[in-house]
Image (cartoon, grey):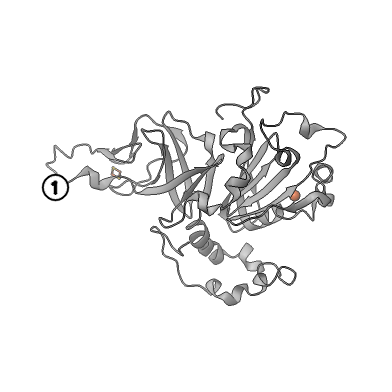
Amino acid sequence: MSASNQFHTAAASPWTSEDAWIGSRRPILEAHALPAAVYANQDFYDLESERVFGTSWVCIGVADEMRPEGQVMVRDIAGLSIIVTMDTQGGLRGFANSCRHRGTRLIESDCTIGRTIRCPYHRWGYDRDGNLISTPQFADAGVDDFDPADFGLHPVRVEQWECLLFATLDHDAPSVDEWFGDLGRRLSGYRLESWRTHDSTMLDIRANWKLITENFQEYYHLPWIHPELAKVSRVVDHYRYQGYGMYCGQTTTPITNDERGDWAAMPPAEGLDHSDMASGRFIALFPNVMLSVLPNHVFVIRLEPLGPGITREHCTWLLPRDPRTSLARTSP
Ligand code: FES
Ligand SMILES: [Fe+2]
């Protein structure tokens, strides 16, 4: 992972000194938490945006948010606006959301376009592969020595992993499969790429994004904060679910049916092995996803930092595509 990408140059900072992290890098039984300022300091937030979000595979949504008929997704990563399209071959494509003429933002928010992305300023047009295909009045004005092939949209890497979409600004980053190491193999029995969105919502949380994902990664608080959940996902049944890769996982095995039996009301996905059928997998994907995988539903929380003290949570519930239930939708 490089410390900068083609859109940003990392600045020197006291936060990049090893001394700032000595306490948190001790062996687990001696280590302490991160310095308090990293949850509130604007300078740290800005540097983190460059060094973490500017160089990682950042989750930008759930796969079935993208539809083939001209859908465009608009996302911010590390302060850069990007657009995601499906190209003419049905593949995912990512681009900087910036016109090659004068840098105007091309698209403000998620929408459906026809075949052409049209700049609002002077109406340059790009196809969904990012090629510049129209430049109004250039021919009449006698502009020559201009090759539209030199002015396609700047590409950004976008990949699907399981049921999620990721983008990175780092041209040198490994593939998203490599990024998550052995996790794809561990989750392969669920065939998550075929699961479909059932419902979604959005929440703005007055907390730093790291506090939210750190809270997800500990179950110490379950008996007092989530007594109902602690009956199904019992503290004593938690285990590490960890291998190499940019994730931190725990599993509850077995999940216990409580007296209400609500969580087991929906049928499980077909073809799960004994372990997947009996377990809940709770996995923090670095940096910005909290993924809960149960036999009959998946809960995704995608974190979008908006500032040092505020984070937008994009929450999505997915269900297996299963002939025994009509609950799973084929499009959101
Ligand atoms: S800035 Fe886009 S066409 Fe001029
Ligand atoms: Fe909690």
Q: Quadrant of residue 292?
A: top right
Badge 1 marks a residue whose secondary structure is loop
Query: Of residues 93 and 148, which is closer to you in this image?
Result: 93
Query: In the image, 71: left or right of 320?
Result: left
Residue situated in front as seen by the camera: 145 or 124: 145
Q: Is residue 71 above or below residue 254?
A: above
The local crowd at label 1, few if under 14, some if 14 to 19, many if 20 or more residues have their Cα within 10 Å, is few
The percent position of residue 55, horizontal first and vertical second, equals 48, 58
Q: Which residue is mark 1?
A: 145
Residue 316 showing in the rendered view: no
- Across and down, in percent, residue 139 comes to 15, 38
As displayed, is residue 92 above or below residue 285?
Answer: above
Task: Residue 6: name its quadrant.
Answer: bottom left
Residue at 67% across / 23% down in the picture?
325
Q: Is residue 136 above or below residue 43?
A: above
Q: Is residue 215 left or right of residue 127?
A: right
Q: Where is residue 29 drawn, in percent x and y?
A: 75, 69
Ligand 1 near label 1 (Cβ, under 8 Å)?
no
Q: Quadrant of the C terminus?
A: top right
Observer-nearest of 276 and 93: 276
Query: Residue drawn at (33%, 45%), measured in percent from left and top?
Result: 153
Name, please, the residue furthest toward the right. 259
Residue that appears at 77% across and 32% down: 264
Q: Amino acid at mark 1?
A: Asp
Query: Relative to the observer, which residue lies in front, 49 or 56?
Result: 56
Residue found 66% across the figure and 32% down from its top: 271
Q: Is residue 328 visible?
A: yes
279 vs 22, left or right, is right
